[in-house]
Image: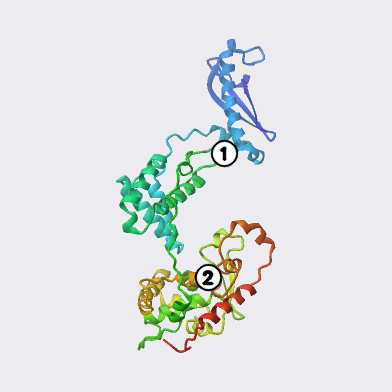
Amino acid sequence: MATFKAEVYAHQKKLDGTYNIKIRVTHCKMKRYLATVWYVTKDDLTRSLKIKNQKYVDLTEALIRSYRAKCDLLGERLKSMTVDEVVACIQREPEESWDLDIVAYARDHVRRLQEAGHAGNAKTYSVAINSLVRFMGRERVSIREVNVRMLERWAAWIASQEGVTTGFAPHNYLSSLRAIHNRAKREFNDEDAGIIRIPNSPFSHIDMPKQPVPEKRALSLEKMRELAHLAYIDSPYPNTNRFNFAIDMFLLSFGLVGMNEVDLYECKDCKDGRITYERRKTKERRADRARISIKIQPEIMPLVEKYRDPTGEHVFKFQKMYSSIDTFSTAINKGLDKVAKAIGLDKLDFYSARHTWATIAQNDAGIDKWTVHTALNHVDDSTRVTDIYIRKSWEPIDNANRKVLNLVNIDREPTSK
């Protein structure tokens, strides 16, 4: 508990006969003395140097009340603070001139995402912030300008000007800016210390545009079988034909229960016939780091061996074939464009392997939704606490995958290129 008292000290008498009023701060049995702007004479004091002039009594009491109010904002944190930390807090000036360029802040976040290998997330934020710049007509936008009125106008502008041409809906843009705004509040506000540089929460006062229903990306069982039995194109250069490579990668992902590109590219743990990894997309949001272990089924093993990293540094040699996850992804997607035409589709993306596995598992193999959910390694807030206490078994996922692969009947030649 911090206490405050206005005092005057005899040994601090100035040459002109005045005394500076000090505020004594006591906390955890330690004391500090804060100078004020007020000086008094002996006429303002009693013989024992107590302040008797009501003017200075009122002024110092008002100052002490402001100090106490700042301490109240600290709550329980006050107990663990030193007296010097308390003094620093109560003397901190209001930051009325503080500001943040939300565009520059967002671009810095995009850069850090790119450096960390999160190219997909980086692109989403970049598209949103570029839209904001075009809407505002300038590169610099103060975070103070992000209010309800601006957001509503921006959402309407997106819907009329950009939604059709970019494929992004107003929900995507506003959600991205909301995430940036919340990140800035966490970084620059300190509610425990009473520092609120970004006080407003405009996103909680608007009706966020509804997220569009995602396009169904799963192949039917028949189309999946057709893809699984596509013949390779003859190529004089092993493992360089994008059509063949895309077939292999789609089947590899499908056979490993929808394993993502970045996880295929980076995984390092393969032993006892299992590939174990932490799912990049969700590992930072889960206590178990989104760890999952997939049994390599017999019909998938030829693909695993075909692309195995001979050095053992990674499970697969993709990092030696492609310099980055982006070039790896580009090669797959260009090949999938040709695969799509071969099976009579307008479009096919890599993530469809994951959607297809889940759809066939539930609709054709009769796998219950909870097992499908677990196999896909999703985040589920409703079971977050329960999951801490349950030792995870991979057997249900293995059994589910076996049923799915039995339906598709994958059969690739181990030496095919």
Quadrant that contains the N terminus: top right
| Nearer to us in this view, 136 or 84 | 136
Colour logic:
rainbow
The residue that label 2 is drawn on is 358
- Identified by mark 1, the residue type is Ala
Question: Residue at 63% of width from left, 59% of height from top?
Answer: 383
| Nearer to us in this view, 5 or 375 | 375
Label count reads 2
The residue that label 1 is drawn on is 193
Q: Is residue 61 above or below residue 301?
A: above
Question: Where's residue 254, x and y in %?
Answer: 50, 75
Question: Residue at 37% of width from left, 71% of height from top?
Answer: 347
| Nearer to us in this view, 376 or 113 | 376
Labels 1 and 2 touching (C-beta < 8 A): no
Of the two numbered discs 1 and 2 on the same chain, state the one appearing first in sequence.
1
| Nearer to us in this view, 113 or 233 | 233
Lateral position of residue 48 relative to residue 191, left or right:
right
Lateral position of residue 43 relative to residue 161, left or right:
right
Pick out the residue farthest to the top.
43
Q: Is residue 125 above or below residue 9?
A: below
- Identified by mark 2, the residue type is Ala
Question: Where's residue 126, x and y in %?
Answer: 38, 56
Question: Residue at 36% of width from left, 86% of height from top?
Answer: 233
Question: Where's residue 65, x and y in %?
Answer: 59, 25
Q: Is residue 239 above or below residue 351?
A: below
Residue 285 visible here = yes
Q: Is residue 247 above or below residue 108?
A: below
Mark 1 and mark 2: Cα distance apart in space: 48 Å
Helix, strand or loop status at disc 2:
helix
Quadrant that contains the C terminus: bottom left
Helix, strand or loop status at disc 1:
helix
